[in-house]
Image: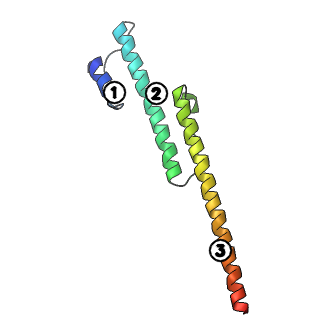
């Protein structure tokens, strides 16, 4: 596959297609290595984001990234936002649970008073 074709696939979001150019010290070889390294990096970040969001959507709010050291530069903001989202959802669900408990307790008290009358 030509470098141009691979870069076009990247631009379309394809990070799975293997890149078959040899890495060497030529400009083409170094470009091939850079593309290969970026592909591996993207796969790891995307898989980790998928894992984190899947855990949150399954109700597991005790999440931890599998590759925190990879979240550099603009990628760090994504991880921070996922952590903030997780904490906000967890807090909201705790408040809902507390509210439901209070409603249940109030309903029990009303029931007891009604039975006593």
Question: Outermost residue, top direction?
Answer: 26
Q: Is residue 57 left or right of residue 98?
A: left
Give the crowd class for mark 2: few <14, some 14-19, many >=20 residues within 10 Å.
some
Instruction: Give the residue number, with chain letter if any, for mark 1.
Output: 11
Of residue 46 and residue 11, the one placed in the foreground of this image is 11
Write down the residue under mark 2.
Answer: 41
Q: Residue at x 66, y 64 (%)?
A: 98
**Residue 23, percent across and down?**
37, 14
> How far separated are the C-alphas under marks 3 and 2?
50 Å
Front residue of 92 and 42 = 92
- Res. 104 mark: 3
Please give left or right for residue 58 compared with residue 35 in the image.
right
Q: Nearer the viewer's eye, disc 2 or disc 1?
A: 1
Going by the image, does 37 lie left or right of 28?
right
Q: Is residue 67 visible?
A: no
Which residue is rendered at x = 39% and y = 7% of the image? 25
């Amino acid at each position: 596959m030509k470098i141009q074709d691979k870069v076009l696939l990247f631009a379309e979001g394809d990070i799975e297609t293997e890149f078959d150019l040899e890495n060497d010290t030529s400009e083409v070889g170094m470009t091939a290595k850079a593309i290969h390294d970026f592909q591996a990096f993207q796969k790891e970040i995307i898989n980790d984001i998928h894992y984190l969001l899947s855990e949150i959507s399954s109700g597991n709010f005790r999440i931890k990234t599998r590759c925190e050291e990879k979240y550099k530069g603009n990628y760090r903001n994504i991880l921070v936002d996922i952590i903030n989202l997780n904490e906000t959802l967890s807090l909201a669900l705790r408040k809902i649970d507390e509210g439901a408990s209070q409603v249940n307790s109030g309903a029990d008290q009303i029931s007891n008073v009604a039975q006593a009358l």
